[in-house]
Amino acid sequence: MTLFYFDVNNGVDTPDDTGTHLADRATARAEALAVLAPIVAELMPDDVRCSVSVTVRDEEKRPIFHASLALVEDWIG
């Protein structure tokens, strides 16, 4: 198991100081992608435009992966 840190930014930087033990980098990538949509869904009622990003850091706290998701909603008509 390897320790990975998941820093989230949804307009505010939220660094991960605890980390999560996962099997490998592929599992860390999957975990980072899995958290994006639920975070955006939480923001949706208050914002018409929102984005969130996750940066994964390794055991030495070096960035190794970054992903972001943006949602833009508009009424038509």
Image: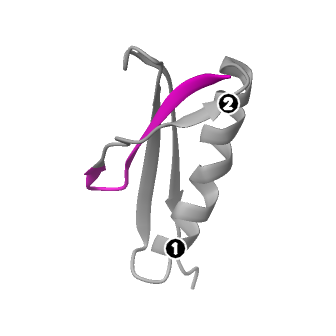
Q: Which residue is mark 1?
A: 42
Answer few, some or many: residues within 10 Å of disc 1's Cα (few below 14, many 20 plus, some between 14 and 19).
few
Viewer-nearest residue: 33 or 25: 25
- Residue 63 in the image: x percent, y percent? 41, 19
Residue 73 drawn above or below residue 6: below
Disc 1 vs disc 2: which is toward the camera? Answer: 2
- Residue 26 in the image: x percent, y percent? 73, 22
Residue 51 drawn above or below residue 23: below
Label drawn at residue 28: none
The boundaries of the magenta stretch are: 1-13
Split into 4 quadrants, where in the image is the N terminus?
Answer: top right
Q: Secondary structure at mark 2?
A: strand
Question: Looking at numbered disc 2 in the image, what kind of residue is underneath it?
Answer: Leu
The residue positioned 44% from the left and 51% from the top of the image is 52
Query: Which residue is most to the front?
Result: 1
Q: Secondary structure at mark 1?
A: helix
Split into 4 quadrants, where in the image is the C terminus?
Answer: bottom right
Asked whether 36 falls inside the magenta stretch, the response is no
The residue positioned 42% from the left and 61% from the top of the image is 50
Query: Of callouts 1 and 2, which one flags the residue occurring earlier in the amino acid sequence?
Result: 2
From the viewer's perspective, is 25 left or right of 54? right
Q: Are marks 1 and 2 in contact (CB under 8 Å)?
A: no
Q: Which residue is mark 2?
A: 22
From the viewer's perspective, is 2 left or right of 43? right
